[in-house]
Image (spheres, rainbow, N blue to C red):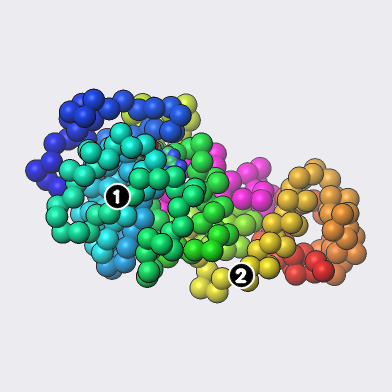
Amino acid sequence: MTDLPSLRESLDAHGLMAKKSFGQHFLLDLNVTRKIARLAGPFAGDAVIEVGPGPGGLTRALIESDAGRVIAIEKDARFLPLLRELDDGSGRLRLVEGDALKVDERSLVDGPAHLVSNLPYNVGTALLIKWLTGPWTPASMTLMFQKEVAQRVVAQPGEDAYGRLAVISQALCEARMVMSLPAAAFTPPPKVASAVVHLVPHAERLAEARIRKLERVTAAAFGQRRKMLRSSLKPLGGAALCEAAGIEPDARAETIDVAGFLRLADALT
Ligand code: SAM
C-alpha cells in the first residue's frame, strides 16, 4: 500500500467529487483509517466486508491488516476504477458493485466475516438493523455512525438516547463506543460529529421468533415512551403482560433494561 498515491491524489486523478445523495464523507487520513482497522481487529485470517469503500482509505488499512480477504461493496460505480488500483494481485480484495441493503452476505462469504464501515449516514441505521436481525450474522461489526445514532446504540436505561435501537442492539450484541471523530475529520465535513461503535454478537443468538416479539414489544413501548407500560402495551396485553413478565405496569419504557424487555417478549402469546 505504501507506493500508492495519496487518497487526495487518487480522487483528483480520477476526477471524483463527493456526492451528497450517496452520503459521501471521506476519511483521507490513513492514520485515522488504520486506527479504525486496529479497533476492529484482530481478524486472524477471517474475511472482512467493508460497505462503501469510496476512495478506499479504510480499504487500504484493511488490506494491510491480518484479514484473510477484504470484500468491499460500493454502490457508486464511479469509484470502482480507483478501487481496482488497490488490488495487489494476491486475490485478497474483491470489489462488489451494489447496494449493501440488498446484498445477501451469505453469497459473499462462507466462513466468519467481520463488518467494518464508515457508513453512509442516510442508510446507517437500516444497515445495522439488517445485520442485527437478518439471516446472516457477522463475527463483529465496527461501524462509524453520526454520534447521535452511536449514542442510541450503546445507551443505558434512564438515558435520553435509550430506546428501541439500544434494546435490540444490546439484546443481540455486546456494544461499545470506541472512538469519536469531529466533523472536520471528514472531506467534505458533515454537519455533525461521528463515532465508531464496536458490536460483537452474543455467543448464543436469540431465536428468530424471540427477535420478532422483541421488535413488537419495543415498538409499542417506545412508540409512546412517555406513557406507562400498562397503557403503551395495551394492544399486547397491557398490565397483565407486565405482571406476567415481572415488570411494574406503571413503569415507563425508558426505565426497563434489556433483560426486562426480553421477559416482556417471552410473555407475549
Ligand atoms: N469508506 C470511505 C471513507 O471512509 O472515506 C467512504 C465512506 S462514505 C461515508 C460512504 C460510502 O458508502 C460512499 O462511498 C458511498 O458511495 C457508499 N454507499 C452509499 N450508499 C451505499 C449503499 N446502499 N451500499 C453500498 N455503498 C453505499
> Would residue 3 be seen by someone viewing this image from the given angle?
yes
Q: How many marks?
A: 2
Mark 2 C-beta to ligand 1 under 8 Å = no
Q: CA distance from mark 2 to mark 1?
A: 32 Å
Task: Indicate the position of residue 164 as horizontal and vertical percent values.
Answer: 66, 51
Q: Amino acid at mark 1?
A: Leu
Q: Quadrant of ligand 1?
A: top left
Depth check: 97 or 249 in front? 97
Q: Which mark is residue 144?
A: none
Q: Amino acid at mark 2?
A: Leu
What residue sits 36% from the left and 36% below the top?
Answer: 76
Please, is residue 77 above or below residue 210 in the view? Answer: above
What residue sits 72% from the left and 62% below the top?
Answer: 213
> Would residue 250 be seen by someone viewing this image from the given angle?
no
| Mark 2 neighbour class, 10 Å CA radius: few under 14, some 14 to 19, many 20 or more | some
Mark 1 C-beta to ligand 1 under 8 Å = no
Residue 111 within the magenta-colored segment of the rendering = no
Say which element carries label 2. Answer: loop
Could you tell me if the residues under marks 2 and 1 are in contact, i.e. CB atoms within 8 Å? no
Corner quadrant of residue 170: bottom right
What residue sits 77% from the left and 51% below the top?
Answer: 221
Disc 2 versus disc 1: nearer the observer: 1
Task: Indicate the position of residue 191 as horizontal and vertical percent values.
Answer: 47, 26
Task: Indicate the position of residue 114 as horizontal and vertical percent values.
Answer: 38, 60
Mark 2 or mark 1, earlier in chain: 1
Task: Indicate the position of residue 140 as horizontal and vertical percent values.
Answer: 43, 61
Quarter of the picture holding the C terminus: bottom right
Q: Which residues are magenta?
A: 142-165
| Mark 1 neighbour class, 10 Å CA radius: few under 14, some 14 to 19, many 20 or more | some
Q: Which mark is residue 95?
A: 1
Please, is residue 219 above or below residue 28 in the view? Answer: below
Q: Which mark is residue 206?
A: 2
